[in-house]
Image (cartoon, rainbow, N blue to C red):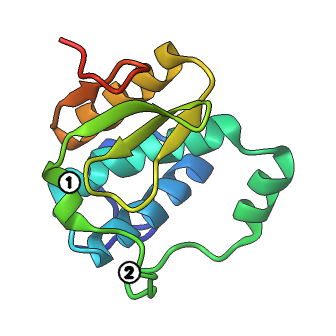
Amino acid sequence: MPWDMNDYPASLKNFDPLLRKKTIDIANALLANGYKDDRAIPIAISQAKEWMENASDKEKKELKKESNPKKNDSHDTSSANPKLLDKPVEVFYEDDHWVVKTKDAKRPSDTYDKKTEAVSRAKEIADNKGTKVIIYKKDGTKEK
């Protein structure tokens, strides 16, 4: 069920209005891509909080000016793939970076210079999806 700024999950009740707005927008996009409510909400919360931490003041002002999310907003459904929800998150070394990518995904979620940062992010993603993390060594062999 899509949400708006007047009708949203109780877990968003005490959120700052801008964080709530971003969370609702992300959650509605996830719903449009076939995610179930109980999976869309925690993923959206995590992504919205990360966005708020990393967004510039300009980006936050732009979001504030945007119209509030509506239940009938259309979302691009071409990039998300609900089939990847149950897939593990992998961490591997490629092109001088540590890559975080859901198994069988076309693009990585993130890349890092340090393996510890990549593993931390992979664990966060896997926790949100309820899956596991598979970590590889620099030489491509799987860690135990």
Element under label 2? loop
Residue 65: quarter of image: bottom right
Q: Quadrant of the N terminus?
A: bottom left
**Residue in the picture at 31% in, 78% down:** 32
Q: 140 or 88, which lies in front?
A: 140
Q: Which residue is mark 2?
A: 77
- CB-based contact (under 8 Å), mark 1 and mark 2: no
Q: Nearer the viewer, residue 90 or 74?
A: 90
Answer few, some or many: residues within 10 Å of disc 2's Cα (few below 14, many 20 plus, some between 14 and 19). few
- The amino acid marked with disc number 1 is Leu
For marks 1 and 2 on the same chain, the one whose residue lies earlier in the sequence: 2
Asked if one can make out residue 38 in the rendered structure from this viewpoint, the answer is yes
Disc 1: CA contacts within 10 A as few (<14), some (14-19) or many (>=20): some
Kindly tell me whether residue 16 is visible in this rendering: no
- The amino acid pointed to by label 2 is Thr
- Choose top left, top right, bottom left or bottom right for residue 7: bottom left
- Up-down: is 23 above or below 81? above
> Where does the image place residue 82, in percent across and percent down from the top left?
22, 65
Q: Residue at x 51, y 47 (%)?
A: 48
Q: Residue 46: x percent and y percent?
A: 42, 40
Q: Give the spatial CA distance, label 1 vs label 2.
A: 15 Å
**In this picture, is 102 found above or below 30?**
above
- Tell me what residue is drawn at x 13 percent, y 50 percent: 86
Q: Secondary structure at mark 1?
A: helix
Residue sitting at x 42%, y 67%: 6
Residue 38, position in %: x, y?
A: 16, 53
Could you tell me residue 144's position as x and y percent?
A: 17, 11
Circle 1 is placed at which residue position?
Answer: 85
Nearer the observer, 3 or 98: 98
Instruction: State the count of labels.
Output: 2
Apparent side of residue 68 relative to residue 38 in the rendered image (left or right): right
